Image: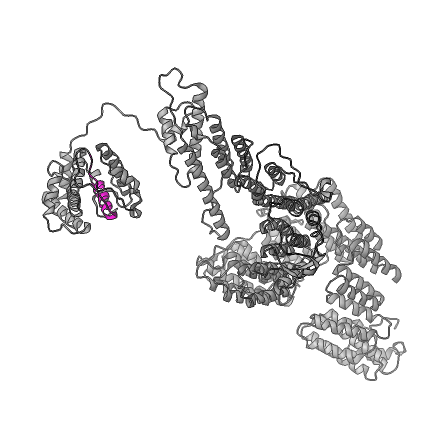
Amino acid sequence: HHPNLPWHRSGSGSGKGRRGTQYAIHSTRSFLCRLHGFGYPLLEKMNNSQLHDGPSMRRMSVDPSPQPSQSQSPAVTLQCKQKQRLLFLLCALSFVIVPVSSFRKSCVQTLAFHTTQSKRSVLEKGIQRWAWSGNTAKQYSPRGIAMSVANSPSLESDVHSSIEVLETHKEKQSSQSSPNPKIAKEKKSLNRKPKKQSTQNKPAKPTLKSILSKPVGELAPSSLNSLCNSIRHNRKGTSFSNLQILERILLELDHWENWQYFKGSNTESRTFLKPLHIFSMLTSLSKDIKDLKQKQLRSKNKRLSHNEPRHEKISAEDIQRLVKVVTLLSQQRHSTNLDPGCYTKDVPSFATMIAAEASRWETSAVDASLLFLDMVEKEEGEAGEWDPRLIGAVLDALARVGRAEDAQELLQRALGVDISNFDSESNKKAGASVVSTSTSSKHLIPSQAGPCYDALLRAWSKKALLLDQSSEPVNPVKKYKNAKKKSQSSNKMIVSALAQARHIILNHMPLQKELTITNRSCSAVLKGYSALGIGEESEKLLMALEALLLSPLYSKSSLKPSNLSAFPSSLDVACYNSVLHACSQSQDSNGVVSAERLFMSMKEQNPLDISIKNSTISHTCNEEQARPSSSFSVIPPQPDFVSYSSMLNCYSKHGMVVKAEALLNEMNDKNFSPNAACYLPVIQALELSTDSDAPHRVLSLIERSDLALPRPNRLLYTAALRCMRRHGCGKEAEIILNKFQNAYERGGPDVYSHILVLRAWEKTKPKADRHVAAQRAKIFLEEMEIKANASLLPRLDCNAYNIILNCYARAGEAENAEKLLLELEDGISSSSGDNTAIAQPNSKSYSLLIKALANSDKVDAIDRAWKILYRLGLPKEVKSTLPLQEPIPFNVSIENFNSMLRLFSKRGKASEAEALLNKMDELIVDGIIKQRGPDMQSYEAVLEALGRCGDADAPTRAEALVTRLEVMSEMGGDCQPSLLAYNILLNCFANAGMAGKAERLLERLDDADSYSFGSTIKAIANSGASQLVSISRSKSLAKTLGGTGNVVIFSHRLKLCAKWGLGNEAEQLIRQMEHTQQLNPGVIHYTAAINAWAKSTDDDALGRAEILFKTMQEKFDLDRAAYGAMLQNYSTRGNSKKARLLLQRILDSPDVKPNRASFTMVIDSYARSKSSNAGLKAEELLNQMRELHAAGNNEVEPDDITYASVIRCKQASKNEKIHDLSNFEKIELMRHLQIESWPFGNND
């Protein structure tokens, strides 16, 4: 491998060509093989010392001989460096382009006689000079070269200095002989003798691929021998490909055996396969499967990059080939072409272990392992003992695929005992004993069957998990009933599988006296409950296992009453962690209670009380031991990091974010440094939380994780951005994105993270902040365009611009939306300054523009929306008198039509919505719309328009439209009436007070929700039913149909109480929500209760209303409706002073703006107060309303009701009535108040 040696002159850069480095090593080995013919024993010593290993060569020693003889080759003692020099020498000899067989022999003899290191160096340098100069052996003999070099002054110099001398000599010689390299090349070509052409073309040596391509039965013995030699040594990762070669060899031999290929020939039979081929192949298969297993474990622990290849897998073809190879070996064991040792009992044993491990990737390997196990039993016979490793490996393979019945049958056959089922009749009898079912003398020793039982328990747990995964409903909308039935049947099978595992560990394994129940056995069952989220049952099983392991069967401690105390737990912390994980996965709230109780016992080392109620213990112990104490205590193990992490997940998944954050802080105090997996569930829980400060808490968690974690985590930043998107906090999202960018020098936030920031601005909830959110989103989009131009982000598609359009639509900024849409149509962004090309708009873009028009207060919004549809190609109904123009292609989508229908719905244009729906049907008939017709959203928009229009026949038209949908659905149409459509129809009935129709429709709905029930109660409240009838019917509906545990249901019931002034009943409903139903009443519930007290005639009604209002102030941010309910209480009771103070609070509040009703109720309070200055106060409020209206608040413009209240106040201050006023006084009062018409009508 020296870079200056002669064989690097050609192909040294890439290692290719005849003189490459790799070829030098192979040529040297072939030269050593030729030396073996001269009787030189150096070959054997070189091979034993692993000559091809390079620098890692070990020392090679040969017994020294003082004087070599002709009959026996001399022995040489070579050290590592000397051996390398010898390698250089032999490589140099092998690359001399002359027939040098005699020369090689003489060189080796010379080397043998010159045994000293100095003389060998002389020979080496001489040979190097000879090979470097390019002369032939006739001019320089090796012995003469050695003697001439021995007298040189560079005798003791190293190899590097010698090579430098050789290079200088080479340059001088080449310059003297031919100064011009072209002339030298021409001379060399002229002096070159032509090669003699061979008279006979030798056939090319067949390759391995060509041999395998031949059909079975056409291979010559030489080809078959080549195949056998190719599988003699298996390199790493080539075992399965070599297995295919072994299969071909066996097929060929089987063909020779069946068809008597050598019949009639005089040649004797030949042995091709030997045990070396078979067992080297099996060993290589085992090593390769082990390597695959390690790669799989590494891939689980380490997250692979996008371009990193995944670990390889084993296919079904490989397993079939292995089965075929072992079967052919079994069939041809007596063949003369196979060595008798090629097939023994070790071959199927080897194959069993290989197939069992291969079941990690291929399920068909499980059946192969069972087949090989039967072959092992056939070879070994029925006598003897089973190898527990074989049984355990096959049971592990069965456990991976959840074949618990097969695993139990195999273990029964191996042990020779019957493992009963948990529901069998024999198991119900007390004192059930182990029944032997073995029919053969071959058995497994029970003391070695512990791992086998562990695999059986894992098999039952895996089966329960697979049943749970297969019981998920495929289509809950269309196949809800079938999926429900399937789920119920699957639940029974899941419970039975876990019950069988519980029965084996509690009732069967204790009867095996030589068997020991370990923590692995307990963990195998507990993990099944953990994966399925069965928290309470797993806790019960944990306590039963503690009682079993502390019983006299397994414990030396006595549980007699005289020794009552707290015993240390027999289980490790992993078993307790499995129970905590099961409780965290549970959907029941009791799971959190169980997990919290168990975790606190572990943390504070509080004893757990356990009751011994195990029939197996009492029937196995003797009479004295059969009376243990009925209960005792166990001290659980200390919690570890996994315990804290499991409890953290439990709190997070059940929405207990405050406790999760406290536990996260506690982990830092306990020196359990939280990792990214601890922060992630807390952030995800805050994402689903309804707390207003959840975004700020997420931001603080991100700051803590940046300081605590050794490296940044992308999952945490992405989860935090999703939380900001859900809560609509764009400002905080930008802060997190900046932290994300600063945490990574390369490959920071991707385009998805930037889109999440845009989504956060899009989801801004307060309507007053949506204008600012749209502006900030547009600025952030411009920053994304700059990054895209700098190739930091990919080019933005239309979806990013649609987010900005939706921001404008939610803010009602139609002009900005139209401007952005024009930029998209032109394909050029004007905001970036360099006219950057942007994406083209899609159908959703135009729909969002129509949505912006719908949310705006523009009078011409409908006309502008029609123009958008006409631009998209909608044909106009009115014929134009203008010259004919080229028709616009029809590009109106159903989504565009739905946006137009929603615009009609918001404006209450029911007739226009119905006309557009009919227009869509006409376009389908005419073939203009070639896609699907109106969808469910189209009909829902029309129904919503009918619910808002206020027409007298709106309920009838809505009912007809729903009937049309039902008929279309029965005829096979795509549209089926949705629950939302029925709820809108119920709302139409509720607005019209049609309680009977609403109740009948509610009875038809199988999946009625809280909105269905609320609309029905609303219909009852708006009907003319009496107080007793309406209250009783709503209460009965709450129990039978809608249930009593929903906030929407309670809100409608509270509104019904407010209608009749039932303040006490309203407060009882709120207390029921808080204490009985575990619900959180909102502002709407408290507001309805205060309104109920406003209409109540009780003496303490005002005080009770003030208490509710104070409670509501402490819990919520009040809105205008809450203030209005309290003003109504003050107004009806004439408490003008408190009403005026409350109105002033509304005026001072930055979040709430007063309206006309707020001032009118305060004016009414002055009218009922009978104060002498009521008229003056009312006029002051009226003037204040006019000032606010002039300032831009259109909601406080006085109307006739306001003027009527002012007139009442002026008359009340004079102790006069309104009908006592003369016409002249009325005119004078109207002129004074600047009223155009009398607000009381002609009668007054």
Residue 582 belongs to the span the image colors magenta? no
Is the residue 278 above or below the residue 498 in the image?
above
Q: Is residue 869 left or right of residue 1086?
A: left
Q: Nearer the viewer, residue 1075 or 545?
A: 545
Residue occupying the far bottom of the picture: 1172
Counting the numbered discs, the total is: 0
- Where 704 sits versus 1041, above or below? below
Name the foreground residue: 1029 vs 1077.
Answer: 1077
Nearer to us in this view, 72 or 731: 72
Q: Residue 795 at x, y = what percent?
A: 48, 55
Q: Which residues are magenta?
A: 72-92
Q: Position of residue 619 (x, y in %)?
A: 70, 47
Q: Position of residue 478 (x, y in %)?
A: 70, 44
395 or 725, nearer to the observer: 395
Magenta span: chief secondary structure: helix
The residue at the point 88 percent across, 59 percent down is 1029
Please indicate whether residue 138 sits to the left or right of residue 10 in the image.
Answer: left
Task: Mark yes or no: residue 772 visible.
Answer: no
User: For residue 74: magenta?
Assistant: yes
Q: Which colour assignment does the render follow? A: one colour
Q: Is residue 984 above or below residue 219?
A: below
Q: Residue 445 placed where, x, y %?
A: 57, 40
Quarter of the figure with the C terminus:
bottom right
Q: Residue furthest top?
A: 264
